[in-house]
Each structure stands twice: as structure tokens, then as C-alpha cells.
Amino acid sequence: MTRFVPDLEIDGERLLTRLEALAECGALTGTAGCNRLALTDADREGRDLVMSWMRDLGLAVRVDAIGNVVGVLEGTDPGPPVMTGSHIDTVRTGGRYDGCLGVLAGLEVIETVVMSGVRLPRSLAVAVFTNEEGARFAPDMLGSLVYVGAMPVESALEITDASRASVGDELERIGYRGATHCPGEVPSAFVELHIEQGPVLEREGRTIGVVTGVQGISWTELVLSGQSNHAGTTPMGLRRDPMVPAARIAVFVREMSDRRGGSQVGTVGALTANPNLVNVVPASVRMTVDLRNTDDEVLAVARAEMLEYAERVCEAESVRLEDSVLAASDSVRFDDGVVELIGNVAIEQGHQPWKLPSGAGHDAQMLARVCPTAMIFVPSRDGLSHNPAEFTEPDDLVAGANVLLHTLLRLANQP
Ligand code: HGY
Ligand code: MN
Ligand code: MN
């Protein structure tokens, strides 16, 4: 017998306590934030903690070949699960809610169902996807990309970080190179709860955001090679200094994004000189360019314009330019039915939901390739994220988890 129990609510205290406990793994001392880069010891600590909660709940827990962890509460009927989840890896100076809210709220929803004794037709699954951030191993959303079959696991395992450590070796080292096959089981639907990481919900005074899609993302690595030389003895006219075109490119990315307007954003987040010494004209400079836009064609033109400019300024300095793609994901439009369901559930719970696209990348944009998918946002204070001061009001965290609960209950009751 299956029934929809309208009065179920999550245990807010349990959710908030777990968010605090997870934030201790890789805590950035003196801040509220975390450094839990993918596949580091801190990431393992966080994974172990979340897996212990899944096991204590009696879920069937699987670890797949790219380290994705999936906990499943079996339904009464055969068939694919309704899935939720997100990631627990962070950037080096991350906050405590980015990704973690989606994983722990998903676990909380399942625990609420277990404690209620309600048996649902469909299974409920909560996933911890590997390396969503892409901060250590590019591209981002790597675990969910492999889960949906968009990248062979063999290729993903060979990806290396700046110290040449590979994903495969690091998974082995932390004990998360699992046996479960990739691609993973296609869910009947996927819903991800996440902090907005932007200023919109706070500006509009809304608690619940219904996410309509994710913008396109392009990450490019540029390596500019000139000639290292003595800072004091080398006349300016004889220099082949890669730092000069690098600086010009960084300013160009800002000016091009401002000029294009609309949803165009551009960031030079990483720039390293080699040998990076005060009295040496650099031999080379490695830098990254993150461009995003809701329109894939405009994004492609913006990237081409940036590369054309980079070639021009490098040539003027007799500097060699090498460019490579670190990440490229098209924009994604979420499923109208799931978007509508989330909006209806939010309204039933007394909210005035606000529809918006996501500026940040999420695992949901990969799951959207294989099943009906959408996301729920809750506000970020001052729109801040990828910053230890990232903060969302506890009431908003709990409100988002309750909208997730009833969205998943509806989906799990569907034949
Ligand atoms: O870069 C992103 O948007 C995500 O945080 N990985
Ligand atoms: Mn995230
Ligand atoms: Mn992030």
C-alpha cells in the first residue's frame, strides 16, 4: 500500500547538525569554511562520515568506479530510483553549504521517510558525486559526467592534477575506487537542492528558487612561453616577457564580458608565473579563462574572440601561446514537468518561488542528459560563494529541504 503523507517534515536540527559536522572535515581554521579538494584526505574524511550516516540508516550503499557514492532506500516496486544528491568536495577556500546541502538534505529526506514508516513505490537514492568542483582535477562535474556516460571512466581515471597525481591513483589512495560499474543506473528523475551562490533570491526577498537551467561553461588553459632573463640587466626592448600578454588577456576578458553584457561572465582565476621570482623575467605563465553564457553560440564566439586577442598580444611580445580546453559544457534547460512540480510544492508550503537559471555548474546539468531533472535554490547571503564566509539562514536551509522532501515524495509515488 503506498500513500502520500502530506504532513511529513524533515528534522531541521538533524540536518543543521550534520552540516556542522561535515564542515569539520577540512575546516579552514578561523573561518566558517572548508578546504576539501576532491580526493584529498579531507574529502575522504567527509565521504567516510556521510557513508557512515547512510549505513546507520540501513541504506544499500554503492561506490562506483569513479568514486561516486550512492545510498538507496528500496521502494515496494521494481524500477529505477528517484535520485537526489550533489557533491561534498569544495574549492580550496570553500564554504560549508556548496554541494553539502544537497547531499545532506537528500539524506535527511530519506531518513524522514524511513522514520515515518511510509513505503514508497519507487526507490529513493541520494548521490555524492566525485569532483564536482573541478578545482583540482578538470573538468568540473567529473563524477556525474562519468555517471551519465558522457565520459568513459577510463579517460576520467587518467586525468591528473598540477602535481601529476591521477584521479585513479588518488581514488585508490583514499579507498574510493569502487566496484560498481559506470555509467550508473539511470534514475526516473533527479532533483538537486543547492545554495544559489548568487544575489538574486536575496535581492527579490524569496526563500525558494526554482532553477530553469544552467548556463554554458567554457574553461581554457593558456600557457604563454617567452624567455626568462635577468630583471636588471635585460633592456626592455630585448624582452620576451609572457607576463605582459597575460596581463593584457586578463584585462581583455573583463572588458569583453562587460562589453557583451547579458549573461556573459568571464574570469581569470588562476595565473602562475614560472619561476615566479622577483628578479626573473618569467620563462612562462600558465593562466585559466572561465567564460560562461546562457547562449551557447554567443559563448563560442566570445571564446574565439578571446583566443584571437591572446594570439595577437602574444605575437607582439614574441611569446608562444598554447591553449587547451579544461572544461566545456553546453547550457542545459531543465525538465518543465519537474520545474512545475517544484514550484507547486513550494507554493503549497507557503512560499513565493522565483524562477531563475543557474550561473554555477551543477551535477544536475549532467543528470539532465539522461532523465527529467531540475533544481531547488535557497538564498546565499550577499550572493557570496566559493568563499569561507558563504552563508545561508538555517530557516532557509530547512525550507529548501522540506520542498525537496515533498518534491521527491511526489516523484516516488508516480507509477
Ligand atoms: O564552477 C562551477 O560553477 C561549479 O562550482 N563547479
Ligand atoms: Mn556546488
Ligand atoms: Mn562550487
Image (tube, rainbow, N blue to C red):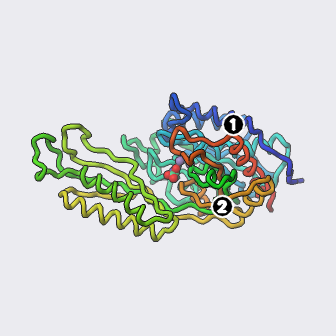
Which residue of the protein is positioned furthest toward the bottom in this rendering? 297
Quadrant occupied by the C terminus: bottom right
The vertical placement of 396 against 408, above or below, is above
- What amino acid type should be assigned to the residue bearing mark 2? Lys
The vertical placement of 209 against 334, above or below, is above
Which of discs 1 and 2 lies nearer the camera? The answer is: 2
Residue 61 location, x and y as percent?
67, 42
- Residue at left offset 83%, top offset 46%: 8
Residue 40 location, x and y as percent?
48, 36
The image quadrant that residue 273 belongs to is top left
Say which element carries label 1.
helix
Residue 126 location, x and y as percent?
67, 47
Residue 311 visible in the displayed image: yes
Q: Mark 2, residues whose alpha carbon is within 10 Å: few (<14), some, or many (≥20)?
A: some
Say which element carries label 2.
strand
Q: Is residue 47 left or right of residue 223?
A: right
User: Alpha carbon of mark 1 to alpha carbon of mark 2: how far?
Assistant: 26 Å
User: Relative to the observer, which residue lies in front, 47 or 58?
Assistant: 47
The vertical placement of 3 against 172, above or below, is below
User: Relative to the observer, which residue lies in front, 257 or 186?
Assistant: 257
- Residue at left offset 44%, top offset 57%: 327
